[in-house]
Amino acid sequence: MTKKMIKTAAVIFAAVLMMCGCSTKNDTKEDTSSAAINAEKAANITAEELLADISQDNLDGRLSKGDGKYDANAAKFYGTGFANILDGAILYNENGGYADEVSAVKFDEGIDGQELLKERLESRTATFRDYRPEEVSKLESAKIISLGDFDILIISDDADTIEKQLKDKLS
């Protein structure tokens, strides 16, 4: 009789452990599905949508892939063939008096977008060094980041705020 009770207790104990294990597994699935939704959201957003809510005084111009002006100049902006730009958008100062810019570009596989944006930044710095030296500090503190599939260049006095807005949009 004691052997039977020990076996029964062991079976009950094993069943309780299995139920606890299942409970934890379900919580993990919820977390994973939430992360999957965020990853899917980041993969499906366009550059134009990503930059849509960014607004600052010196960023009054907007162009994105599909706009004739963007399509005609993107290869020059980023130093690569237009076929290598899968999606892109740029916020800039229309008058050209300020260095402010936010570029979000999804480059084709095998293209080093970070390097291309670094070259873009160097070019802008060289231009503004002679044209408007007071803008150079903004260029020297610019950010080049990668978010989702996008490589992003942020030139602004408020680059940290813009970076946070972009990260929030993709999470």
Image: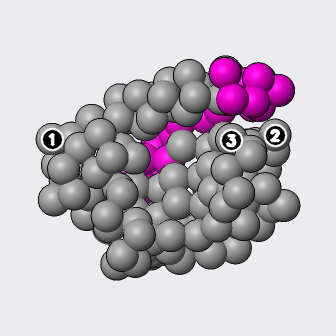
- Viewer can see residue 83: yes
Q: CA distance from mark 2 to mark 1?
A: 32 Å
In the image, the segment drawn in magenta is: 130-152
Q: Secondary structure at mark 3?
A: loop
Residues at badges 1 and 3 in contact (C-beta under 8 Å)?
A: no
Residue 159 lies in quadrant: top right
Which image quadrant for residue 170? Answer: bottom right
- Rendered image: mark on residue 99: 3
Name the N-terminal-most of marks 2 and 1: 1
Residue 134, magenta (yes or no):
yes
Residue tagged 2: 157
**Is 49 placed above or below 99 here?**
below
Q: CA distance from mark 1 to mark 3?
A: 29 Å
Work out which residue is located at the far front of the displayed protein and give it.
131
Comparing 15 with 76, the one in front is 76
Work out whether 108 lies above or below 89: above
In terms of sequence position, does the residue under pointer 1 or pointer 3 come before the other?
3
* Image x and y of residue 146, in percent: 46, 44
Q: Secondary structure at mark 2?
A: loop
User: Circle 1 is placed at which residue position?
Assistant: 110
> Which residue does the image show at 23% across and 44% down from the upper left?
80
Q: Nearer the viewer, residue 39 or 154?
A: 154
165 sits left or right of 10 in the view: right
Type of the residue with mark 1: Gly
Is residue 165 among the parts visible in the rendering?
A: no
Q: Please tell me whether mark 2 or mark 1 is closer to you in this view.
A: 2
Point out which mark residue 134 bears: none
